[in-house]
Image (cartoon, rainbow, N blue to C red):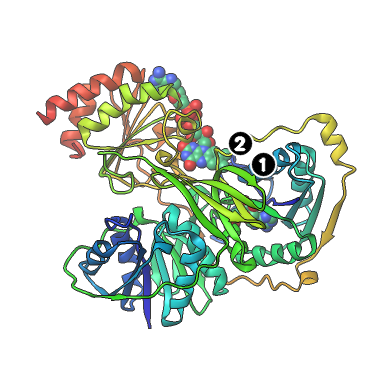
Amino acid sequence: MKVLVPVKRVVDYNVKVRVKSDGTGVELSHVKMSMNPFDEIAVEEALRLKEAGIATEVVAVSIGPAQASETLRTALAMGADRGILVKTDATVEPLAVAKILKAVIAEEAPRLVILGKQAIDDDANQTGQMLAALLGWGQGTFASKVVIDGDAVLVTREIDGGAQTVRLALPAIVTTDLRLNEPRYASLPNIMKAKKKPIDEKSPDGYGVDVAPRLKVLTTAEPAGRKAGVKVGSVSELVAKLKDEAGVI
Amino acid sequence: MATLLLAEHDNKALNGVTAKALTAATALGAPVHVLVAGQDAKAVAEAAAALSGVDKVLLADDALYAHRLAEPLAALLVSLAGGYDAIVAPSTSMTKNVLPRVAALLDVMQVSDIIKVVSPDTFERPIYAGNAIQTVQSTDAKKVITVRTASFAATGAGGSAAVEAVGAQADPGVSSFVDESLAVSDRPELTAAKIIVSGGRAVGSKEKFGEVIEPLADVLGAAVGASRAAVDAGYAPNDWQVGQTGKVVAPELYVAIGISGAIQHLAGMKDSKVIVAINKDEEAPIFQVADYGLVGDLFAIVPELKSEIAKVKG
Ligand SMILES: Cc1cc2nc3c(=O)[nH]c(=O)nc-3n(C[C@H](O)[C@H](O)[C@H](O)COP(=O)(O)OP(=O)(O)OC[C@H]3O[C@@H](n4cnc5c(N)ncnc54)[C@H](O)[C@@H]3O)c2cc1C
Ligand SMILES: Nc1ncnc2c1ncn2[C@@H]1O[C@H](COP(=O)(O)O)[C@@H](O)[C@H]1O
């Protein structure tokens, strides 16, 4: 069974992004970029399926600028077999990403696609669900456990109040939550090996997908800040402040 | 036309986040119909009908919707979509699962997690863990929107809308429900609580959560939250996680205990009215957003805080 893993290049989760002073967006030059953390979890899950003898090939795909090939290299260094770069400098919204992925899937015919639940830049949490819709496949979002069971996959999902397990006919879509696994680090020999693994280059046009945005970004602004607070010296001082000053207890 | 609001519920009771999303739905300016999809969910539909400003309630009562699986529920929403300009839902794990599926089937780009309705096609939403706020205008003919409920006040009671039954749609037949384990708690839900007491990695174990964090929550009548580190370590259940990729809350009072204040955590609580931080590291970033900070060992401070508050509350 082939597993496809879409990986997005995003601002590293440790970076505190800054809004540009002219309100046109956030500062992205000279900022550390990494693979979206949820996508590392997706790659890890695919690799574990391969190590368990269930997956036969793990293909990573990224839609983005030329530098997104670095993100694919990271996936290859972790152990993915090959990469597909759908190269574009445009901002591609989740709906268009889903359409491109659908076209990739038509060529690659994977039985399982594992995405992150959310890209930590746009915080959209949409792409996997949209892809499942476009394909008419079942979706196991926010997964904390994935078990292949013959022609189906059992996905345990993190939901409000606890956990839910669903059974999906394969092929299917899974999106990862934080507790699914702990992604491995790429070893130096594997980083070297990854340099020789193939990355195919494609374009949205080649797939016939229009990536024109549907959402017009009018402005990007700094969030309202909080007033600096005070340090209190004791529990009784804290309780007095909460009662008399803040009036919350 | 009208706006369709998807209700959040557990088949028995309407979840309070629905009334918050109703405030956003009403701001779109069109009449609001509420869809209750569930099994034996008549009481939920009646509760929705009693919300002020609701024009009509649609009740799709069928075993197919008992667990609100995305595939059948999206098919139902799409079958109704023709009559609506906008489909709106409170942002919950259920709607985050189903609404993007609806959007894609309608060829619409969803607007996720809005915090403000600027006009019927223009919205504010946070990106980068809330470090930037985008104002976006949707150019799609239909709008599909999830609402960050911490940013909207609840609409009150006072309505008396009619409840209309709608039939189930065919099951797409690609998914089925296996089982569910839901925690039962007497405490308020995170998204409804006026006070939240949250613990981080420093709490150290599930037992300590029970011995130190929960008693403070109980004396305050508070909900309990946690950082990702505490959830990952198994000290707290996953749905207690507050943050960028967990729950977003804005209670009257948020008490962060042994939580460092990573941006991903702040993203979920920094709109709280009053924030208290208890941390032994005076440099911890959580103090930058705290109204009241107390530096010290949580295992000494929290029990004392609990008794002091109990005294004050008599
Ligand atoms: C993709 C992604 C998504 C994420 N999403 C979330 C999210 O939604 N929510 C979230 O919370 N995090 C999230 N995180 C994780 C986040 O980056 C931090 O790692 C996490 O919030 C840290 O949790 P913590 O503050 O409990 O632990 P730590 O950072 O380890 O902090 C523990 C704190 O306790 C203090 N302490 C230690 N002992 C004591 C004591 N005895 N008394 C008092 N204080 C003490 C320490 O000084 C320290 O400040 C995410 C990370 C990633 C990469
Ligand atoms: N440009 C992209 N290239 C590859 N995968 C993507 C891209 N955008 C989104 N994804 C995938 O979709 C998931 C959810 O993204 P989003 O819907 O934007 O929050 C990510 O974790 C990725 O797995």
Residue in view at x 65 percent, y 45 percent: A42
Q: Mark 2 points at which residue?
A: A181
| Mark 1 and mark 2 residues within 8 Å of each other at the beta carbon | yes
Which amino acid does the dot numbered 2 rest on?
Asn
Discs 1 and 2 share one subunit: yes
Which amino acid does the dot numbered 1 rest on?
Glu
- Is residue B49 visible in the rendered image? The answer is yes
For the residue labelled by badge 1, is the local secondary structure a helix, a strand or a loop?
Answer: helix
Q: Which of B271 and B28 is in front in this view?
A: B28
Q: Name the residue under label 1.
A: A45
- Left or right position of A228 against A39: left
Residue in view at x 45 percent, y 30 percent: B230
Rendering coords of residue B155 (x, y %): 24, 63
- Numbered disc 1: what chain? A
For the residue labelled by badge 2, is the local secondary structure a helix, a strand or a loop?
Answer: loop
- Residue A211 shows which numbered tag? none
- Numbered disc 2: what chain? A
- Left or right position of B241 against A205: left
Q: How crowded is mark 2: few (under 14 residues within 10 Å), some or many (20 or more)?
A: some
**Relative height, residue B59 to residue B207 (above, below):** below
- Is residue B111 visible in the rendered image? The answer is no
Circle nearer the N terminus (1, 2): 1
Which residue reaches farthest left? Answer: B314
